[in-house]
Image (cartoon, rainbow, N blue to C red):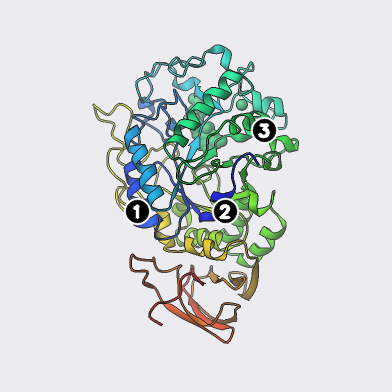
């Protein structure tokens, strides 16, 4: 691949959807680094449309006006740079959601300058600069989703489609990504990757610089939704360039956990996925599915969603991505503390994120130190060790980890064989790892190849060899 896979080994990714940069920085230091996260996916950092008439929806960010990263709704360029540095010092990489398939849509023209003050119109972005000739010839919406020419050369929800085949667009996009890399950004979620030919992306990726601090080319995972059509517009058509999001995991495992069918999960990830595990980023929900399908989400399912995210980290397929977000009543609702008062025309988020306040939920905090499990077990396969009815399973990950999940309404006490070495282990699913490396949760004894644990109702227990109990 022209991008690097190395970063994927450093721990799960957490999507801090719509967080201000300064809040992300603080979270890296206080919570993410200590509890084993490898990276944060941040919301798109480029200049975006300002849709005051629509109440500043979250999706302003997916309509770029220019590649300035100053004065977005999440902060200034200086705050962005400070975040990247502080997260890096905490061992956490920043992955940028890169919106490079398109610019703005019809509904947004005439609504005033972008978040950093740039003028624009559909097919005209003088601050970049992009003009009419930089856009695909097809000036209408995609209608045949099985036709690669339409999927990649027509418009996605009326967003002006960049001609990524052109030298000017390729070099301009590469300059934007290299600007971010220069600040220390270590990877990208490539938004709408399915809507760009793999050859165009390859040309852009080969121009990318090495990441200062971490070294090597950036890590790339591409958003390629499952669907019909030839392989060129499905996940396998992009794996030679970098990782892809595997939406089969979301739809299949998400549904299994939602319905309490945990005993099927290990078979599903062994047999039913679109690409190999070392090429996939997996999640049970993301910012789109939270709003547009009936799958599992925290707001819909509470603790079952926490269980689903913990299981996603513990199971052997792909790099886990955790969703962390805010409560909402309507699909378009922007983040909490979005100032609409005078003096804040961009609809900036004016207050830092305080988890549990103002509607910020912060799902990742409920996972405690579970992310450390992923790094401890690496790519060792799973061996089932216990099951009870459909909703309860336990498995080992080689000799490195043991985890048990209980999607029922009562606690599950089980004694199971395990390959973990004898010792006393902290339960990382139910306690964070504090500054003193102390075990905040219950400790469980492994003796003679056996362990007895009590898994809470709608909960998990997870033990691994990097979290031995210091007091034992
Ligand atoms: C993505 N991945 O490929 C993002 O995950 C997804 O959140 C983005 O859509 C989409 N691609 C484009 O980057 C989001 C909202 C859309 C919104 C769009 C642009 O889900 O609803 O479209 O961002 O802001 C909105 C209106 C449309 C309208 C369009 C253009 O909802 O009705 O046609 O703006 O004016
Ligand atoms: Ca396109």
Q: In the rendering, at what x and y percent does residue 376 appear? A: 53, 65
Quarter of the C terminus within the rendering = bottom left
Instruction: Answer whether residue 295 is visible to the viewer in this image.
Output: no
10 Å crowding of disc 1: few (<14), some (14-19), many (20+):
some
* Residue plotted at (42% across, 27% down): 48
Q: Identify the residue under disc 2.
A: 319
| Of pointers 2 and 1, the one earlier in the residue sequence | 1
Gap in angstroms between the C-alphas marked 2 and 3:
22 Å
Q: Determine which of the numbered discs, if any, sits on residue 198 in the image.
A: 3
Q: Are marks 3 and 1 in contact (CB under 8 Å)?
A: no
| Of pointers 3 and 1, the one earlier in the residue sequence | 1
Quarter of the N terminus within the rendering = top right
In terms of secondary structure, where does tag 1 sit?
A: helix
Q: Is mark 3 within 8 Å of ligand 2?
A: no
Gap in angstroms between the C-alphas marked 3 and 1:
36 Å
Q: Identify the residue under disc 1.
A: 29
Task: Tell us which disc is closer to us: 2 or 1.
Answer: 1
Q: Is mark 1 within 8 Å of ligand 1?
A: no
Image position of 374 with respect to 360: above or below? below
In terms of secondary structure, where does tag 2 sit?
A: strand
> Where does ligand 2 appear, by image quarter?
top right
In terms of secondary structure, where does tag 3 sit?
A: helix
Q: 155 left or right of 463?
A: right
Q: In the rendering, at what x and y percent does residue 41 appear? A: 47, 44
10 Å crowding of disc 2: few (<14), some (14-19), many (20+):
many
| Of pointers 2 and 3, the one earlier in the residue sequence | 3
């Amino acid at each position: 691949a022209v991008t690097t896979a190395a970063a994927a080994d450093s721990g799960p990714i957490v999507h801090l959807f719509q967080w201000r940069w300064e809040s992300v920085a603080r979270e890296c230091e206080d919570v993410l680094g200590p509890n084993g996260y490898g990276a944060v996916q941040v919301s798109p950092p480029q200049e975006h449309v300002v849709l005051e008439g629509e109440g500043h929806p979250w999706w302003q960010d997916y309509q770029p006006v220019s590649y300035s990263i100053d004065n977005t709704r999440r902060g200034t360029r200086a705050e962005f740079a400070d975040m990247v540095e502080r997260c890096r010092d905490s061992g956490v990489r920043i992955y940028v959601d890169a919106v490079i398939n398109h610019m703005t849509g019809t509904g947004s023209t005439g609504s005033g300058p972008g978040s950093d003050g740039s003028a624009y119109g559909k097919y005209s972005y003088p601050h970049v600069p992009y003009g009419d000739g930089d856009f695909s010839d097809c000036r209408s919406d995609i209608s045949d989703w099985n036709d690669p020419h339409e999927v990649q050369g027509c418009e996605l929800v009326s967003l002006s489609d960049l001609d990524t085949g052109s030298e000017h667009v390729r070099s301009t996009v590469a300059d934007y990504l290299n600007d971010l890399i220069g600040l220390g950004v270590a990877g990208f979620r490539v938004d709408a990757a399915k809507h760009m030919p793999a050859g165009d992306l390859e040309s852009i990726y080969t121009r990318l610089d090495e990441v200062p601090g971490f070294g090597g080319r950036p890590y790339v995972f591409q958003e390629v939704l499952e669907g019909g059509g030839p392989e060129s517009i499905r996940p396998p058509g992009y794996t030679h360039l970098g990782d892809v999001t595997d939406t089969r995991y979301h739809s299949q495992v998400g549904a299994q956990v939602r319905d309490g069918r945990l005993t099927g999960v290990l078979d599903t990830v062994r047999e039913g996925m679109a690409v190999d595990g070392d090429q996939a980023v997996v999640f049970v929900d993301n910012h789109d599915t939270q709003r547009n399908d009936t799958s599992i989400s925290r707001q819909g399912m509470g603790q079952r969603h926490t269980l689903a995210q913990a299981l996603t980290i513990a199971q052997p397929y792909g790099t886990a991505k955790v969703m962390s977000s805010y409560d909402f009543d309507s699909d378009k609702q922007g983040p909490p503390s979005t100032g609409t008062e005078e003096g804040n025309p961009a609809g900036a988020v004016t207050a830092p994120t305080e988890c549990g306040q103002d509607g910020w939920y912060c799902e990742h905090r409920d996972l405690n130190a579970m992310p450390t499990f992923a790094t401890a077990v690496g790519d060792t396969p799973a061996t089932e060790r216990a099951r009870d009815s459909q909703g309860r399973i336990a498995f080992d990950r080689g000799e490195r980890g043991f985890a048990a999940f209980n999607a029922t309404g009562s606690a599950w006490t089980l004694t199971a064989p395990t390959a973990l070495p004898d010792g006393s282990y902290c339960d990382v699913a139910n306690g964070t790892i504090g500054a003193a490396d102390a075990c905040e949760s219950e400790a469980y004894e492994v003796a003679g190849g056996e362990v007895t644990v009590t898994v809470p109702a709608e909960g998990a227990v997870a033990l691994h060899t990097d979290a031995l109990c210091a007091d034992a």
